[in-house]
Amino acid sequence: MASKNNHLEHTTFAFLDIETTGGNSSRDRITEIGIRFWRAGEVVGEWQTLLNPEVRISSFIEQLTGISNAMVAAAPSFACIADTLEEQLRDCVFVAHNARFDYGFNELPATLEVGVS
């Protein structure tokens, strides 16, 4: 049992959360990705980026998330940050805040299946 505890103390957990333009994964897009990294019960890092969803953010979603069209206008697309996201998650145990919802967005599955343990 001690070896399992020791392994967990050295394991980094990546808690990922996304914000989107809405709740329909076939038409809505990701506007923000945030990750908080934990190891041995302590935060050891964070990574966050806004994304240009290439679709308009409704006023309802702007109020809900605090992310506006102006904020994402000059942000990179998901394709531009996919490699960086994969690198951030490499060798981590991936933990999704709302996995069923998050995983439904087309951009995420291909990235999350590569290099994540």
Image (cartoon, rainbow, N blue to C red):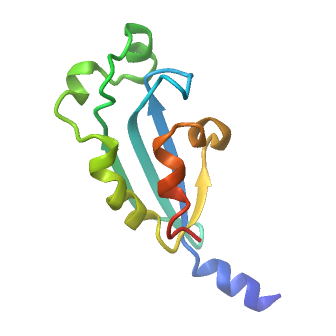
Q: Position of residue 66 (x, y in %)?
A: 36, 22
| Residue at position x 36%, y 54% in the image | 82
Name the outermost residue toward the bottom: 3
Establish if 30 lies above or below 16: above
Establish if 59 lies above or below 22: above
Q: Position of residue 10 (x, y in %)?
A: 57, 81
Q: Position of residue 51 (x, y in %)?
A: 31, 37
* Quarter of the view holding residue 1: bottom right
| Residue at position x 23%, y 27% in the image | 71
- Relative placement, left or right, of 54 versus 6 is left
Q: Position of residue 21 (x, y in %)?
A: 43, 23
- Relative placement, left or right, of 42 versus 8 is left
* Quarter of the view holding residue 99: top right
Between 5 and 56, the residue placed more toward the observer is 56
Between 15 and 112, the residue placed more toward the observer is 112
Q: In which quarter of the image is the C terminus?
A: bottom right
| Residue at position x 19%, y 27% in the image | 73
| Residue at position x 56%, y 22% in the image | 23
